[in-house]
Image (cartoon, helix red, strand yellow):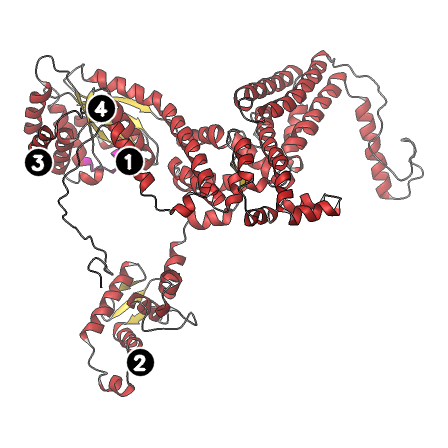
Amino acid sequence: MDPTISVSKGCFVYKNGATRANRKSPAKRKNAVQASEVKSSLLGKELTSQPLYVAYTECWQQLHSHIAQLQAESNARTLEQLEMFVTGAGEGSRDILPTAALLTGINQPDHLKQFESFTRHLHARQAARVCVLQSRDCATLKAAVESMVYNLMETLPADEPDDEDDEDERERDCERKRLRRSQCTMKQLNLWYDNNFGGDGVKRRVLVVILPDFECFSASVLQDLILILSAQCARLPFVLVLGVATAITAVHSTLPCHVSSKIKLRVFQTQPAPTGLNELIDKVLLSPKYAFHLSGKALKFLTHIFLYYDFSIQGFIQGFKYCLMEHYFAGNAFALCTNYNKALGRIQQLTHDDMETIRRLSSFRPYVEQINDCKRIIAVLTDDDYLKKKLPQLLRDCLLYFMLFRSCLEFFTELVGDLPRCPLGKLRRELYVNCLNKPITLQAEYKECWQMLGFMAKDEFIAKVSKAIACTEQFLTEQILPLELGDACSAEMRTELHTLKKLLDDVELATMESHAVAIESTCHLTDARPLGDLTQVASRQELKEQLLQRSKHEKQQSLSEYARALHKVLEHIETHLVLTHLRPLQNAPPLHELFVFSDISTVRRNIIGAPRAALHTALNNPHFYMQCKCCELQDQTQLVSTMPDLSVVYKLHLECGRMINLFDWLQAFRSVLRAGDERDELESNQEQVDPQVQARFTRAVAELQFLGYIKMSKRKTDHATRLTW
């Protein structure tokens, strides 16, 4: 057996004379990390060279950079205000401790990146030395002080010069090693600060102590730490930053009066998590410059995880990244999910299997069925070259569909997003989901919105539609025109908007007076009788239709000029914008599956895990995960001696009731292990149990107890209680 191969978890160290790596500047360190990531990819070259992987990496890099830029912009204002407070606090009064309470929200892991960005920014400006204290490292006051002093003195800022030679660096490293945790005291911190920042002409730096998880700290430790820092403010320019996840009342309830009187508190508010999510979806996920799209159900699933589970934007981003991976890794045919010119270049790289993948798409069959020529049908189904010639037009139709959909969604959001009670939703992502899932005109909420628009006052209706037109034109100019195929999309949308402006001018010039105008009846009867002829009605159904026709006719005759003009505007919006461009996915152009991810079952199975089912499967049938021949079972209830001890003990405990006799359990475990031995030997040694078998049984029972399946009974010392059923 190889000496470095072990069934247990271990670490094998080989001393080959390697020395400690030299420190590098952040830029050099970042380049080195990127180079190492490229060289040490877990995927083989046979996969990384495939078009699907190239398309995936290009798309994710663009999305990731856009997301990082958006998050930096959203956090910049708060961090800038916090930085001004920190730098100004060091020059202010030294009597009390300047304290900033940053209301971060309930999801703490998401906001740790904000504190990391804040720390890097302060180090880059050489304005402060920053120490981040986690609650897990500060169980006692002594541990908290030692961690604070050690981090302030030992942490190397990002602005540290890297032009020193190796000998000076080694000397400095030796000086750093002389400082032990037991020596990290406030006295040592005072001496260090005087030596580094106490001289004349040296820029005085603020000492910032950040507690990102304020609520998790022990109240006594926190109070004593604040009192110590406030007592040292006369000599050391301390600034305390508290990351508050709940509300500012948590600070007042934790700190008593004699402690709160020692701090000067200022509250800062970060962007709420739902606001950040909506901004992320509107500006990145629904941006028309990306060819990849989520279906309505997929987006709704990810947002529900965010809203009802964790409130984590980072978790939402990782879920979206998983959807992106699943989409592209379905085959090289999905590498066509990119901008139009790149997609045209990748068409010729498609193999026969890739073309068959395209033919298996659900929207490909309706495309074939609408072809009237049998020869063309045969060519599309059998000739790869012929289908490749048709792909450019099909891809263009899909890309135009999504661009027009997004443009009309911008108009529709401004039109119905602020109506009373918001029947269709007030957020763009809600309307996106409603429009993609099913025909929106068939929904009751849509009819309610249209009734509200019809009941609006003249000035209010004109202002609303004009604002929607202006927002759509601005969106076309800023978001659509710079893109490929943006000219075609913009030309088609501007034509509809120009017609809508003319109809809106008619509404503005219309009066409220009623005019009797002969309007053709919309009710179609089998025999065309006059409206007033109700004497020859043969049935109750015909009478009902006649009365309905009469009421509609009288209502249309009494409509004012303004009502008729408003009706034309709404009819144009519904016919030429909603029904034409806001179509659901089932009415989308052929091959739209290449651009839309909709496999919810896979995402649900991998993102929202089922630990109980996975544990049962692993313990009941280890072959499912281990894929070893020795554990392969013919029947799920079968017991094999080669299975892991934990699996044997687990399957035996499933056969017991609420109380499990440990001696009987041990005998059953022993019988399974010795199933292949001689029967007489087993019977002769019934009372004597092999110590090795007993040790294996004891360890397996302890592991089963650790997993939470059993617990030791207090009523009977030789029994265990089963906890699951």
Question: In the rendered structure, which disc, 2 or 1, sits on the residue that comes first in sequence?
Answer: 1
Q: Which residue is mark 4?
A: 123
Question: In the rendered structure, which disc, 3 or 2, sits on the residue that comes first in sequence?
Answer: 3
Nearest the eye: 429 or 718:
429
Q: How many marks?
A: 4
Under mark 2, the amino acid is Gly
Q: Residues within 10 Å of mark 4 (few under 14, many from 20)?
A: some
Residue 594 at x, y percent in the picture: 55, 41
Question: In the rendered structure, which disc, 1 or 4, sits on the residue that comes first in sequence?
Answer: 1
Viewer-nearest of discs 2 and 1:
1
Per the image, is 214 magenta?
A: yes
> Is 354 positioned to the left or the right of 588 in the image?
left
Under mark 1, the amino acid is Val
Vertical placement of 2 versus 311: above or below? below
Q: Which residue is mark 2?
A: 676
Question: In the rendered structure, which disc, 2 or 4, sits on the residue that comes first in sequence?
Answer: 4
Q: Which residue is mark 3?
A: 177
Marks 2 and 4, Cα distance to the nearest angstrom? Answer: 69 Å
Nearest the eye: 35 or 269:
35
